[in-house]
Structure formats: structure tokens, C-alpha cells
């Protein structure tokens, strides 16, 4: 019987374990996770802090018992310290400090990512918080409930986590300052024409924006009292550090080949440079269809799909990943923004001779007065090949489903010209006969 070990049972690991156990017999699956819980949906953290959901109960979709009921052996609170790749043995420390080892035929690394820790004085003060695990969210919430004197919260990093938490803390009644070195929020996902909409939205709801500011120190005696940037010092009784993720490659041991940011380099079957070892989720690279090359994009959606792909390959069915576009979305005070592929700025940074076509219109014909909102769309494409490289959409209307089509367009290497006459249905309840997608494509240079 083939012995498979999975290290890490969060989104990527759980997807691979379920796929193996649901589809294959005669396999022996052993799982190790250093944490006490699995499958926490981090996206729910902001909703929980902002009191938009009652509590964290619904934010888990799997656990040790469910995986064991399917036949896996699951060791929680058990950290793999070292892997002997030559003899195919993992060495672990259990929750009660005991050492154990286990051998494998195939190994799946799903060790995820770690929050980047900015190297600044004061980062070890009380109430300086990372926000990745369920326990992190619980700690923040406990502190907010127990310490009403925490009134000023500085959120460092205006990426996805920072923006979502800024809204959450403001909804929780706190004064929020959002600090980023970049000149806007969400700068790696959207162009300024779109981030402007988000930043106006945040400002209108009382979030104080401090962009183009570099954090130099967090100050206080035991607890945080203020945060110092190159442009000013701001009161803060809590500081959230959300400046991105780095791949957790600690088990690579100079044995596995790494991508430039340290992620385990994998092929389209999720196999690493060692034939017996696969890597999935945030610890691994992805194939990025927008740039048609290897890349690193940390998202739960990628984690789940890469887990499915690895599971089939490990169990003997050849399956290649289709690649990803980094499709993502955010919803802040009713404003929905979705994007896929490259922004115009990013496309240029990658060396594309890129153009963008923009369009703004109402979602539905003007005679529809109910729930009819303006929509902004930008489609980014390559000037020479006309290949669609990315798309961004923003509206107070729920335009989220539209971006999936652009995700597929990038995956299938469609051109902006093919989009011009694409059959898109029309019904006034939903859209316009000359809808903004068609119009953006038709008006592309
Ligand atoms: C606040 C927040 C909101 C987010 N919102 C979204 C969203 O809306 N949409 C989206 O697509 N993505 C979102 N993400 C990103 C998403 O959570 C990650 O991409 C996803 O968690 C990656 O899953 P993973 O299983 O690869 O890694 P991780 O979630 O990092 O899990 C890795 C697992 O490996 C275990 N592990 C690590 N090392 C060892 C070891 N040595 N021994 C044993 N076990 C080990 C850890 O305990 C952990 O359980 C969000 C993240 C956060 C923090
Ligand atoms: N809705 C979604 O899809 C969500 C996705 N995620 C994913 O989780 C991962 C981690 O999210 P984030 O931590 O928000 O990363 P991020 O990459 O989205 O944003 C990090 C931000 O920190 C800024 N930054 C970097 N160094 C800084 C410094 N020293 N000082 C101030 N600002 C600094 C960057 O300019 C950037 O705006 C990302 O891959 C993200 O896509 C997280 C939350 C929600």
C-alpha cells in the first residue's frame, strides 16, 4: 500500500487529503499539522471583528474527525521539524513534546505561508498583532472586548488584509489609520483609477489614510502607544501588521529547488525537484497564465486547486494544473472590486507593451431605476498580440461573477478583438444591450 504523508492540513492540505480519500483505495494517508485547528477561512476574520457575523463557528469546513472518518491518520499539534529526503522519513514533535518519525513513499508539503514581519523597533510590544490564524483573530477580538481603551488602531499594509480589517475595526467602533508605503490601497491588484474609488470609499467612512509613508518604529513601554512613520507619529493602542505573506519553506532544507521568493518550485503536476515530493498552496509556485511563466500568488482558491491536482498525481492519475490568473475580489462598505490577471501598471512592469480600454456605464438601462448602479471596467491587453492580460471591475452593484469570464479569457489566451462580438445575453433586469464589457472591447484601440 502506497504510504502518503501530508504536512499541513489547512486549505491546500485538506483539499489534497479529501481528493485522495474520496477517489482512491489502497492508500495510507498520514497527516501532520502543527496547529490545533484546520480549514479556518481567514476571509471571515474581518466579518467577525466587524460584527457582521455572529461568531467564528461557520468559518471552518473540516476537522481531524472528518478526515479520520474517511480513513486518514491525523496528528494535530504535531510539528514536522525535519525531513530526511534521502531515506524518506519525516521527524516530528508531538503536542506533548515527544519525538516521532514516519516514513513515506510520497510526500505532500502544504506548509502554507507566514506573515512577513517588518524589521522595525517595537514590533515585539504588546498589542502588535499579526492576522493569519484563527488564534490571531481570537486574540484581537478578546483584546478589543476586554480593553475598551484600545481606541486607535494602526493597520500597516493596505493590501487585501489591511483594507478588510480597516473596515472591520471601524465597524467595531475604533478609529483606524491605514498606513502603506505605496501611494494607494490595493496597489498590486488595481490601477490608480480603481484604487481611487476604494480610497474615497474608505475616507468617506472615516478611515484615515496614510499612503506613501514608511513605518519606522512602533513605540510604547510594554504596550503599543504610537506608531512612527517617516512623515509623522500617530496614537495607536493596537498595531496590525499586514504587509504580505512569504512562503513557508522551512522544511526545504537546501534539498528542494526554490523560486526567487523562496517558494517550492513545482511543475504543473505540483511535483517539486524531488520526484517523491509535491508542494501545494501558499508554500509553492503557480503557473501564471497572464505572464505565461512561473509566479507566486498566495490565495486560498489556488491552494485548493493545487491540492486537488497533487492528490491525483500522487495517486497515479496524471493531471496538469491549468494555471491561474490570480483572480480576486474585495467588498468594502458595499463597494465590490474584482480583478484578474495583470493591472496596466503590472503588465508594464513585466515588460508588456500593454494598453487598457476603459468604460463606465450603468449596470442596467437607465429606465430601470431600482438597484441600478454605475460600473467601471478596465481591460488590459497586449498591443502587439492583442492577448487579454487582465481586467478590473468596480461597482456598488454585485459585478463579481463577470470577472470569471475574464479569468477564462486569460487562461484560453483570448484576444481583445475576440471579445468585441462575443454573445452576451441582454435582459434589462440584469444588463444593457450594449453592455460595458462589449463597449470596452469595441472601443479598444
Ligand atoms: C485574514 C486573511 C484573509 C484571507 N482572505 C482570503 C480570501 O478572501 N480569498 C483567498 O483566496 N485567500 C484569502 N486569504 C489567503 C488564504 O488564507 C491563503 O492563501 C491560504 O490559507 C493558503 O492555504 P495553505 O493551506 O496553502 O496554507 P496555510 O493556510 O498557511 O496553512 C498551512 C498549514 O501548514 C501547517 N504547517 C506549517 N508548517 C508545518 C510543520 N512544519 N509541521 C506541521 N504543520 C505545519 C500550518 O499549521 C497550517 O495549518 C486570506 C488570508 C488571511 C490571513
Ligand atoms: N479577498 C482576498 O482575495 C484576500 C486575499 N488575501 C491574500 O492573502 C495574502 C496576504 O495579504 P496581505 O498581507 O494583505 O498582502 P498584500 O500583498 O495584499 O498587501 C500587502 C501590502 O503591504 C504593503 N507593504 C509592504 N511592505 C510594507 C511596509 N514595510 N510598510 C507599509 N506597507 C507595506 C504593500 O504595499 C501592500 O499594499 C495576499 O496574497 C492576499 O492576496 C488576503 C485577504 C483577502
Image (cartoon, helix red, strand yellow):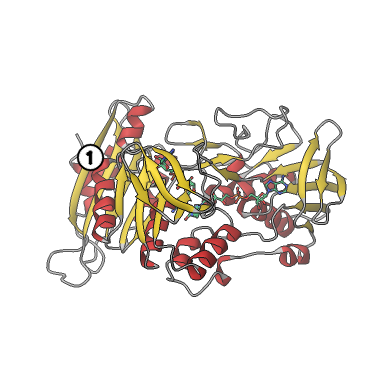
State whether label 1 is within 8 Å of ligand 2: no
Q: Is residue 361 left or right of residue 283?
A: left
| Picture quarter with the C terminus | top left
Q: Is residue 5 left or right of residue 190?
A: right
Image: 226 above or below 167: above
For disc 1, the neighbor class at 10 Å (few under 14, some 14 to 19, many from 20) is: some
Image: 249 above or below 405: above
Relative image position of residue 284 (x, y in whole percent): 60, 38
Q: Secondary structure at mark 1?
A: strand
Relative image position of residue 336 (x, y in whole percent): 32, 58
**Residue 52 shows in the view:** yes
> Please, which residue is most extreme toward the front here?
221
> Please, which residue is most extreme toward the bottom here?
54
Q: Name the foreground residue: 385 vs 425.
A: 385
Look at 44% across and 71% down and name the residue there.
Answer: 51
Image: 250 above or below 7: above
Relative image position of residue 61 (x, y in whole percent): 61, 65
**Residue 159 shows in the view:** no
Q: Is residue 279 left or right of residue 377?
A: right
Q: Name the foreground residue: 222 vs 39.
A: 222
Say which residue label 1 marks: 357
Residue 149 figure quarter: bottom left
Relative image position of residue 299 (x, y in whole percent): 51, 48
> What is the count of numbered marks?
1
Look at 27% across and 61% down and name the residue there.
Answer: 205
Amino acid at each position: 500500500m502506497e504510504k502518503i504523508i501530508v504536512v499541513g492540513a489547512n486549505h491546500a492540505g485538506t483539499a489534497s487529503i479529501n481528493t485522495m480519500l474520496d477517489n482512491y483505495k489502497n492508500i495510507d494517508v498520514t497527516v501532520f499539522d502543527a496547529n490545533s485547528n484546520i480549514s479556518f477561512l481567514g476571509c471571515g476574520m474581518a466579518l467577525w471583528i466587524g460584527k457582521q457575523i455572529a461568531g467564528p463557528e461557520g468559518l471552518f469546513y473540516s476537522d481531524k474527525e472528518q478526515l479520520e472518518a474517511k480513513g486518514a491518520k491525523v496528528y494535530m499539534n504535531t510539528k514536522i521539524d525535519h525531513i530526511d529526503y534521502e531515506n524518506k522519513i519525516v521527524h516530528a514533535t508531538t503536542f506533548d513534546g515527544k519525538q516521532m518519525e514516519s516514513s513515506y513513499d510520497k510526500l505532500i508539503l502544504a506548509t502554507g505561508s507566514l506573515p512577513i514581519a517588518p524589521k522595525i523597533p517595537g514590533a515585539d510590544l504588546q498589542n502588535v498583532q499579526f492576522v493569519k490564524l484563527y488564534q490571531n483573530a481570537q486574540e484581537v477580538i478578546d483584546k478589543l472586548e476586554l480593553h475598551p481603551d484600545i481606541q486607535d488602531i494602526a493597520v500597516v499594509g493596505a493590501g487585501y488584509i489591511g483594507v478588510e480589517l480597516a473596515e472591520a475595526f471601524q465597524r467595531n467602533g475604533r478609529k483606524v489609520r491605514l498606513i502603506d508605503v505605496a501611494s494607494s490601497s490595493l496597489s498590486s491588484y488595481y490601477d490608480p483609477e480603481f484604487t481611487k474609488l476604494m480610497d474615497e470609499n474608505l475616507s468617506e467612512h472615516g478611515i484615515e489614510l496614510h499612503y506613501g509613508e514608511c513605518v519606522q518604529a512602533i513605540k510604547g513601554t510594554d504596550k503599543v502607544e504610537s506608531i512612527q512613520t517617516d512623515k509623522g507619529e500617530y496614537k495607536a493602542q493596537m498595531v496590525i501588521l499586514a504587509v504580505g505573506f512569504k512562503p513557508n519553506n522551512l522544511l526545504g532544507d537546501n534539498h528542494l529547488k526554490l523560486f526567487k521568493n523562496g517558494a517550492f518550485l513545482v511543475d504543473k503536476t505540483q511535483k517539486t525537484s524531488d520526484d517523491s515530493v509535491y508542494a501545494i498552496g501558499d508554500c509553492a509556485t503557480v503557473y501564471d497564465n497572464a505572464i505565461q511563466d512561473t509566479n507566486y500568488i498566495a490565495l486560498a482558491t489556488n491552494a485548493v486547486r493545487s491540492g486537488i491536482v497533487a492528490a491525483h498525481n500522487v495517486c497515479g492519475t496524471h493531471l496538469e494544473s491549468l494555471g491561474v490568473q490570480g483572480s480576486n475580489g474585495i467588498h468594502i462598505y458595499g463597494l465590490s472590486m474584482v480583478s484578474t490577471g495583470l493591472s496596466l501598471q503590472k503588465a508594464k512592469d513585466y515588460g508588456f507593451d500593454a494598453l487598457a480600454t476603459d468604460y463606465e456605464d450603468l449596470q442596467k438601462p437607465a429606465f430601470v431605476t431600482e438597484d441600478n448602479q454605475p460600473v467601471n471596467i478596465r481591460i488590459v491587453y497586449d498591443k502587439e498580440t492583442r492577448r487579454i492580460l487582465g481586467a478590473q471591475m468596480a461597482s456598488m452593484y454585485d459585478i463579481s461573477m463577470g470577472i470569471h469570464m475574464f479569468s477564462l479569457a486569460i487562461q484560453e489566451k483570448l484576444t481583445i478583438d475576440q471579445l468585441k462580438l462575443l454573445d452576451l445575453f441582454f435582459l434589462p433586469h440584469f444588463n444593457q444591450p450594449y453592455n460595458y464589457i462589449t463597449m470596452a472591447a469595441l472601443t479598444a484601440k
